[in-house]
Amino acid sequence: MTIEIKVPVLPESVADATIATWHVKPGDRVSRDQNLVDIETDKVVLEVVAEADGIVGEIREQEGATVLAEQVIGTLEKGDGAAATNTSNEAASAAQSNSSTQSSEGEAVDITVPVLPESVADATIATWHVKPGEAVSRDQNLVDIETDKVVLEVVAPADGSISEILADEGATVNAEQVIAKFVAGAAAPAAKADAPAAASADNGDADVLTPSVRRLLAEKGVDPSSIKGSGKGGRITKEDVEKHLQAAPAATSAAKSADAPVPAGMSDRTEKRVPMTRLRKTIANRLLEAKNSTAMLTTFNEVNMKPIMDLRSQYQDVFEKRHGIRLGFMSFYVKAVTEALKRYPEVNASIDGDDICYHNYFDISIAVSTPRGLVTPVLRDCDSLSVAEIEKGIKDLAIKGRDGKLSMADLQGGNFTITNGGVFGSLMSTPIINPPQSAILGMHKIQDRPMAVNGKVEILPMMYLALSYDHRIIDGKESVGFLVTVKEMLEDPTRLLLDV
């Protein structure tokens, strides 16, 4: 029985994904639930496991390929894999190849740009890792090709060498365009293998490096053999590389300085110019599009945090002893926002074409900073959660984000977003709406400020609130009323208990 190996369902905001690492090859015997392949999206790395015991038949999409949700990327023969034995040799010979047939000794092969997604018109040659005449090994990365969404790696179809490079770094290329000529030959000597592949072999297997890790190692000029991987099977993660760089800033700085010598007496006046990547350009364009496609406006207020701080000081120890978790500020923010969303349903709604969709549930996205960037996992049904349940839910999401274990279900949906720039010291900001949501609330740094209270000046811990909203659906009255409600709930938390 043949089982199709498919890409998992992707969240609504993720159009496609990248094959990061195949852990098996055609003909390999695998066990049920064994990890077959890692698939990388903009936010998380997904593991696709075997549905049953069997033998890997065909691998249809190679590492670096851009794939869509539920796309078939390989096959698995259930049981002893009798049917697979007829096709495994053929599939193995086709794997990791840029031509329809496997290269033989001395055969010339065209190196072509991989097939691009429908929404991607062209790509850019980012980095050639080899030079003409340089011996390479089968599956060694030859060139990085950057699209608007991902970086694709094109690997050697066999042992041999590049005879001619037809498209230099920085060139714009199209799908299936020939960018180099390759000649199959003898195996490349170990000394001539590319540095990242050779170094990672010392760690056990070149496959332990995902494309994103390889790019980071190349950008920072780090030898992977000097890093001990903490990931599954000894895999080096981006966090491992970042920790290594933090531990040896002097060495890294010296290496960069050596690459860019400057005139005597001006050693402290260096600069580095790096072209903006296509991915960064796309992020910039999408942020700009979010601002231009919504009638976004921001309204501000401020809140006296002393009542909540006093409440936390009074009950912190009892709360932690009873519930096993510390009492933070975010649970109060979520409770106050949930109550305000009940009173102002427009803020909890979204625009769908010419319709307004009002949501009768309260799923709140919480901005979480991770090593991969800022993500917004969703805390669901906040109206039915206690303060302790909210604190535990936020902690679980933060840990998942830190460890790169956020699932697609964690990231899907959400009617409203809370972002807390105050943890980084932000005093005031204008957050950008997370479409298709209609509003986002920014919390900021709590800072002691002199305030007039009953005709006297008092020093109080104050925090600015910023609500960015889509003026097409939310009027000024609703936006100000919403923010005032949040302020009142935070300044008098008893209201949350009495529902007043």
Image: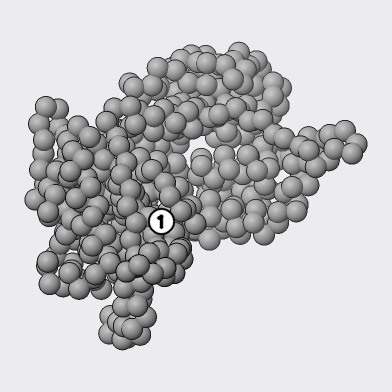
User: Residue 431 location, x and y as percent?
Assistant: 37, 44
Above or below, 137 relative to 479: above
Residue beneath label 1, please? 444
Element type where label 1 sits in the image: loop
User: Residue 73 location, x and y as percent?
Assistant: 33, 35
Q: Nearer the viewer, residue 146 or 294?
A: 294
Q: Residue at x 28, y 62 (%)?
A: 333
Q: Nearer the viewer, residue 435 or 98?
A: 435
Viewport quadrant of the N terminus: top left
Q: How many marks?
A: 1
Q: Nearer the viewer, residue 267 or 62?
A: 267
Q: Residue at x 65, y 15 (%)?
A: 164
Above or below, 110 relative to 46: above
Viewport quadrant of the C terminus: bottom left
Q: Amino acid at mark 1?
A: His
Q: Quadrant of residue 168?
A: top right
Outermost residue toward the front in this view: 455
Q: Quadrant of residue 477?
A: top left
Q: Is residue 66 visible?
A: no
Q: Is the residue marked by circle 1 packed among few (<14), some (14-19), or many (20+) residues within 10 Å? A: many
User: Residue 188 location, x and y as percent?
Assistant: 68, 33
Above or below, 65 relative to 369: above
* Side of 111 relative to 79 (left or right): right
* Side of 267 relative to 66 (left or right): right
* Side of 151 relative to 87 (left or right): right
